[in-house]
Image (cartoon, rainbow, N blue to C red):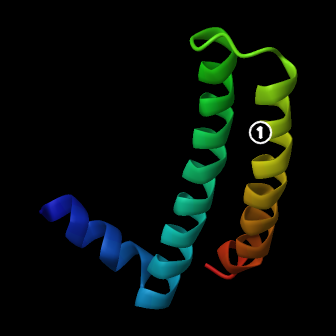
């Protein structure tokens, strides 16, 4: 509870906290895409092209979402 209060006070405004949360969500989306691609190849045994296509398609979408959120992080 004390750490949560310190984090909220550290960001200063709820807008800064919201921007940081948005970047966190975008980063988790990218990491999830990469890990799911690895699971598709190494665990589920898909041929290499299917996880690669999945990674490229969703990686571009997630990367674009992350890039759009990045300027809001600089304003913190």
Rendered residue at 87%/23% (across/down): 49
> In the figure, 23 relative to 28: above or below?
below
Describe the element under mark 1 as helix, strand or loop: helix
Instruction: Find disc 1 in the rendering and name its residue.
Output: 54
- Quadrant where the N terminus sits is bottom left
Looking at the image, which is closer to me, 18 or 59? 59
Residue 42: x and y, percent? Answer: 64, 10
Residue 4: x and y, percent? Answer: 23, 65
Residue 41: x and y, percent? Answer: 69, 16
Looking at the image, which is closer to me, 5 or 18? 18
Q: Is residue 19 left or right of residue 55?
A: left
Rendered residue at 49%/89% (across/down): 15
User: How many discs mark residues in the rendered view?
Assistant: 1
Q: Is residue 64 left or right of residue 22?
A: right
- Quadrant where the C terminus sits is bottom right
> In the figure, 20 relative to 38: above or below?
below
Rendered residue at 78%/74% (across/down): 68
> Can you name the residue that lies furthest to the left here?
1
Can the viewer see residue 42?
A: yes
Image quarter of residue 64: bottom right
Question: Few, some or many C-alpha atoms within 10 Å of disc 1 (few <14, some 14-19, many ≥20)?
Answer: some
Can the viewer see residue 13?
A: no
Residue 47: x and y, percent? Answer: 80, 14
Looking at the image, which is closer to me, 11 or 47? 47
> In the figure, 51 relative to 60: above or below?
above
> In the figure, 15 relative to 8: above or below?
below
Rendered residue at 61%/60% (across/down): 26
């Amino acid at each position: 509870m004390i750490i949560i209060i310190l984090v909220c006070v550290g960001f200063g405004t709820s807008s800064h906290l919201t921007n940081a949360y948005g970047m966190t969500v975008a980063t988790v989306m990218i990491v999830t895409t990469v890990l799911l691609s690895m699971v598709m190849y190494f665990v589920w045994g898909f041929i290499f092209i299917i996880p690669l296509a999945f990674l490229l398609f969703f990686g571009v979408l997630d990367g674009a979402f992350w890039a759009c959120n990045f300027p809001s992080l600089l304003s913190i």
